[in-house]
Image (tube, rainbow, N blue to C red):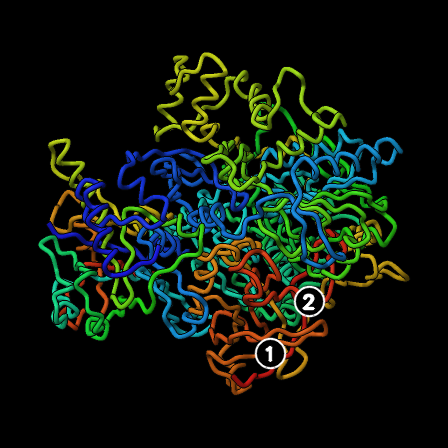
Amino acid sequence: MKWGMVIDLQKCTGCGECVAACKLENNVAIVEPKESEMGRTMLWMDMLTVYEGEYPRLRVRQFPRPCMHCDHPPCTKVCPVRATYRNEEGIVAQIYPQCIGCRYCMAACPYTVKSFNWYKPEWAPGIRETANPDVSVRLVGVVEKCTFCVHRLQKAKEQAKAEGRNLREGDFQTACAESCPAGAIVFGDLENTNHRVNPLSRSPRATRLLEDLGTEPKVIYLKEVD
Amino acid sequence: MKITRRNFLQMLGITGVAAGGISQVWAIPDKWIEKLQYGPRIETWKMSTCGQCPAGCGIRVRLIDEIPVRIFGNPIAPVNSGFICPMGEAGLELLYHPDRIRQPMRRKGKKGESSWVPISWEEALGQISQGLKGLLKNQQADRFGFFFGDRNTLLTHFAGDFVTRMGSTNFFPWRAPGINELGLWQAIGEYPPPSFDLDKTDYLLTFGTNLLEGPPSPVYFNRLYGKLKESRTRTGLKMVHVDARMSQAGKNATEWVQIRPGSMGVLALGMAYVILRDKNFDEEFVARFSVDFRGGKEDFQTMVARDYPPDKVFAVTGVPPGTVLRLAREFSSAKAPLALSGGTSDRSETALFTQWAVAGLNALSGSFSAKGLWREPVPLPWGPTPIPSINTRSGAFSLKPKLAPDTDLPAHWASEELPHLRSAGKLPDLEMLMIAQVDPLYLPVDQKPWQEWLSRIPQVVQFATLIDDTSPYADLVLPATTYLEQWDMTLPVPNLPFSQLGLQQPIVPPLNGARPIGDVLLALATGQGVTTLLSEKSGKSYADYIGERLKPVFASGKGTPFFEAVSLKFLGELRERGWQVYSYPAFADFWRLLQEKGGWWDPGEYPEAEWKKRKKFAFPTLARLNALLKERALLSPGQGTTKGEPPSNKWMEGPARKPEAPDSFLLAPFTTLMNMTGEGASQPLLRELSGLIPRVYWQTWAEMHPKRAERLSLKDGDLIRVVSGKGSVTLYLKVVPTVSPEILGVPFGQGHKESGRYAKNVGANPVALIDPLVDPLSGRASWQSMQVRVEKVNK
């Protein structure tokens, strides 16, 4: 089993819904304006923009960027306390209580997907109640990033176990894949030929970010062709 | 709760056990701790409809032990099919907002001062009731008015009904017009305009229309764009976006055409010139279903041939003649071409002219003859509802079953101009004005007349969830519920090719002493003995009113509550046999199903538009335009266009301006998906994410073309001061190639003086820099073509 994600850029409209869904699903802190100005805004899922050419041939490429969950993750190799590791299902996981906040992993990640908790998470009264009770908030001094919504996987596994069956496709969806209006994000088991991600990941349009680094990301982009 | 490493670990242990071994679980709010330790932790789901914008997306709210924790899309709601937008996601931040008004408040100081004395609901209602009684007693019912933010729900009709029953006609709804609304009203005299089916077009040309970041339904159109973008690689569908700024609609199109703000109508007629010269137009439609095309001195053909050759069009619009030629030929050769106008094009001084010209382009190119492209909206089984209108001769507002094409316009086009209509003597001096679901001191271009007007009205009553920019000018502020605490019904979304009713139901009981607007109006009408709004048998609450309105829908047997996807063919076969997806023998069953499923819809699309049955399509001609200018002089008081000889061709030269100096720009405010009309600013998630693409979080930025920035020695991230005759704002500079070199793009929606802690004094409002200019044909305030100067500010 190898969880992975395919993002079809030919379908993506860049609406940013995946970013909003991710922030709320995972209780990612909203960083106040002053901190934000120092570049401390936290986004597990980001939306990147690339400008190609000049008007009238200007093309703007927008692509959602979650953690790549690399098969050879540079971040796990530098963690001195094994607070980040690649689990047997391919998810690059974080153990928050174990993290000492050295931020080596942040420096090592070529995709800059990791965020550091500079302050303890604080919500204004009331706004706190919008938090998702299924996901822990992180402590001050801890690095965090996209988990492929692993809490949903655990729930789905328990559900499947209770029903005495194997996990099916669709039992476990990340918040971004579930919420994408354009249907651009597909999530599933890359090794299972019955999952949609399997044939999609082998599409002639398939590409990975910074492939030459040999990190073998499990987030695969399908290129825009027009 | 203070979060320390120690109690984090303790909590992890506690909740891990309580939640059955889900190790990542850790609850946050204090009062949940107890529930998580001892509570049953029961997960429930409730269906409702989103109220953040008028799009009517179905939502599914997740509750843990009756506490709403997350909003998802309702998978069986036809508009959004389970998806929602960031604004929909953030709804709980509005529900739980720390600054929500907790009880009615009376203003303490002078108008314009935000200081308050809390009072009881009884006192507040008593005061309003007394005021209303006094007006009715003195036969001054016309001194009562209601300025109402129309969210496309039944509440708008209810509020309109309330005003009518009070004996007044002063119901002023506020909302943005639909796509093509202005142009098709003028061309065929129809309101609402025919819908369109984007799926059926092979050439989509959007004149300023940004379907992806604003009304009518961003989720529906993002979904559809995703599909069209993928299929266009096979079908050859071309999507061209014409605008001064490359909005998301431009980024997702196959081509973006830069144009000077306010000149889109000229481009449309320039394309018409080429199509006519090539003789490649829909002759059958033109001959059978149109008037003023040819014949007569001032017909459409003559005007276009004389005034709109590509080189002249280039001089006005900045679009090269070659591009005009190519676009026109591609468009007229397409099988099902579709041109849409709205968004920035209805926010200019040429709004109606532009949309009319675009409608003319559709008529010429064969769009109206294309199969299945245009759809006929079917009225709901409860029959037609009164339309708020403004009479362009007398300036009087009223609710009418049908608008008269010669004299009436939909009231929401001109409702920003109320203070001007008052100073022109066309509105009576109001004694009492109610304001709900809209912030008229934030939205309009010209805020000063609004301040003065509201200051003169003795009794301004505002329904609000948060103190906003209007509140200091209200005498009484009543805490209103959010859409998550009230009953309501969203109506079919304009422009979409099918019909639906989305049920809004309370996910939680009203928080903090807030009351639903519908119930307050009902209490005022019935309890205070002013008049009656509901028939006696229909009950006592606004929910009963909704039930009452739905009875004809149930009785008609049409449509069905939302259901899981089945093919329309299968559904047709079911129907032929007299079966249906759900069985609901009594109204109570129907009502229960609506609550369970989230709404009602009529599966299948609207029937194809028929041109035989409707009024002939009137092409825009100079004579008609100039006649309209005279006819509607009332809508643009102060902008004298009617004295002396009519202008030869105002549409060519006047409104499309160019920057006058090396450091001057045309200000082009735009809206984003995170903050359509400024309401998103009160919610922290949307505050932060509104700057997602330019990476300027929590601030307002200005977009400038790299060439202009280089010439002014400015770079990305610099602070600039943008100065107009009305004032100045300081903004972050983003240097991007997605704006035309002549404009300065600034997002709308920030710079509130109030609206809660997350919005107050954060960012800037570009609209406040704009001179009050109005489209004289529609009464729409212009956002375009304002000259501003840019100065560098040292950090």
Q: Residue furthest left?
A: A88
Mark 1 on the same chain as mark 2 = yes
Circle 2 marks a residue in which chain?
B
Percent x, y for residue B18? 22, 41
Amino acid at pointer 1: Arg
Amino acid at pointer 2: Ile
In this rendering, position of residue B310 left or right of residue B429:
left
Distance (Cα) linking label 1 and label 2: 15 Å
In this rendering, position of residue B717 left or right of residue B772:
left
Q: Quadrant of residue B266?
A: bottom right
Q: Residue at x 73, y 51 (%)?
A: B778
Percent x, y for residue B39? 29, 36
Circle 1 marks a residue in which chain?
B
Percent x, y for residue A101? 22, 70
Given this view, does label 1 or label 2 mark the residue nearer the observer? 1
> Residue B356 — which label?
none
N-term mark: 1 or 2: 1
Q: Quadrant of residue A48?
A: bottom left
Q: Residue at x 59, y 41 (%)?
A: B480
Q: Is residue A182 visible?
A: no
| Residue with the mark numbered 1 | B721
Secondary element at image label 2: loop
On screen, residue B480 above or below B533: below
Foreground pick, B414 / B67: B67
Percent x, y for residue B731? 55, 74
Can you say which quadrant of the picture contains the N terminus of chain B? bottom left
Foreground pick, A13 / B593: B593
| Residue with the mark numbered 2 | B770
Foreground pick, B6 / B201: B6
Residue count near mark 2 (Cα–Cα under 10 Å), binned few <14, some 14–19, many ≥20 = many
Q: Is residue B188 visible?
A: yes
Q: Residue at x 58, y 75 (%)?
A: B730
